[in-house]
Amino acid sequence: MKRERHNDDEKEDRLSDLSECVLLHILSFLSAKQAVQTCILSKRWNNLWKLLPTLRLSSSNFDTPDGFTQFTTKILSLRDYSTTLYYLRFSSEDLVNPQLCILNRAVSQNLQRLRISLLYYKIHILDCIFSCHTLTSLQLYVRHPNATTLFPNSLNLPALTDLSLRRFVFRSGNNGRAEPFSALEKLNSLSIQFCKVLDAENLSISSATLTNLTIQTKQGRNYGKIELYTPNLYTFAYAGIPFEKICGSHLCSVKHVNIDAYMRVNNAEPPSNLLSWLKEFTGIKSLKVTLTTLEVLSLVPNLLKDKFHFLCNLKSLRVKKEGISSGLSTTPMLARFARLCNHVLSLVPNLLKVIFHSLLNLKSLRVKKDGISSGSSNTMVDGKFVRLSVRCQEEVDKFRKAIYKEGSPAIPDDIVVFLLQNSPSAKSSYH
């Protein structure tokens, strides 16, 4: 069979024949540096990068901070602003103060979405960013663990619907609370990660339009209380050590709750606010928790004696093996064991010497997962074995089987029953 030959001059440049909007869409997935480099492909590509609706600027694509600053300055000054810059993503991986003033021109040109991610520990965010009337989405991430970036007291972002913050410090007013988001009249989704209020004052979130709220805290007390005045809040997600109390009004509007709680060995006392959270969110239909969350909940004093008349509308309980905090936390089981050891050692100062002088011939130490009572349909409640109902026992058995299969720490049987007791039709799952 003869192969049909084509002259090089007759080859079609199919990519360049695509419409301009399609080419710009393709270039939007590249970094700004890569997009500019396409100008060598042909005359058609010479000025396409000037019309990009999306710019992805990252210092990781440059050898030096100065090189990144010079490139950013040039591309923003040469851009054709007769076309709208829809999305700007600016990321600096350097431990030097980035020159954010170079973003002034872009922010002032009807920008709609802005994402800034910085490693430097002390940042002054441009005032123009917090007074951009066209911004609908704003993501500000400071990644240095010792960051002390102050969040402004006033915002002028009338179009903003989506706000995400990481490692910012809120200042409280004379009333002992910080209210950083009260001026955002269209806010729909809010995420605050590793933020705090100065002097651990209260954080107040007041919004008639907010439907989705995500809070992630770092070790220690970040807020005195979290006050929610959000009558349309629908989804609430939390990750961290739940020291803060949650209070407010219209919290029955929350239907979906996702909690990834944990604690550390050096915590003086276990966080005991999880139960009060579940009581505040009276309208929950879907509850998603991690294994460590159930363990933290099991440490609440006299939990099973509490008259729990909540979670009556629960339709789904999902338990996740791992969450956001996986690998960063100490499980409550280990924390409780550590405190128990410290307590015993305080009562018997020479206990370790006694033990280690007495076990000189020990060759093997084995810890069994199951004991004589394994598989029993009875569970320990207030120091007594109580027989569970058939339905509750089935739910507990399902969880126990799934957890042991994965090799995970055991969930206290009583906690599963406790959460499901007022929702006979609720479905549960483990994954």
Image (cartoon, helix red, strand yellow):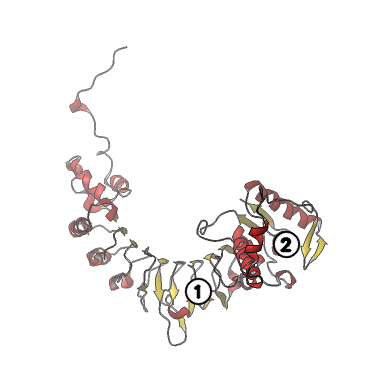
Q: Identify the residue shown where x is 51% and y is 78%.
A: 224
What residue would you read off at disc 1? Answer: 221
Q: Nearer the viewer, residue 280 or 313?
A: 280
Label 2–label 1 contact, CB within 8 A? no
Q: Nearer the viewer, residue 40 or 406?
A: 406
Dot 2 or dot 1: first in sequence order is 1
Q: Residue type at mark 2? A: Asp
Return the x and y of residue 408 as percentages of the image width and height.
Answer: 62, 52
Query: On the rendered structure, is 217 left or right of 374?
Result: left
Return the x and y of residue 384 as percentages of the image width and height.
Answer: 81, 65
Q: Is residue 311 visible?
A: yes
Q: Which mark is residue 26?
A: none
What residue would you read off at disc 2? Answer: 414
Query: On the rendered structure, is 301 left or right of 2?
Result: right
Q: Nearer the viewer, residue 92 or 295?
A: 295
Per the image, label 1 sits on a secondary structure element best described as loop
Q: Residue type at mark 1? A: Arg
Return the x and y of residue 15 as percentages of the image width and height.
Answer: 27, 38
Q: Identify the residue shown where x is 73% and y is 69%.
A: 304
Return the x and y of residue 313 as percentages of the image width and height.
Answer: 68, 65
Toward which corner of the image does residue 11 lie, by quadrant? Answer: top left
Residue, far top: 1
Per the image, label 2 sits on a secondary structure element best described as helix
Callout 2: few (<14), some (14-19), or many (20+) C-alpha neighbours within 10 Å? Answer: some
Q: Identify the residue shown where x is 19% and y is 42%.
A: 44
Toward which corner of the image does residue 395 lie, by quadrant? Answer: bottom right
Toward which corner of the image does residue 69 lie, by quadrant? Answer: bottom left
Counting every numbered tag in the picture gives 2
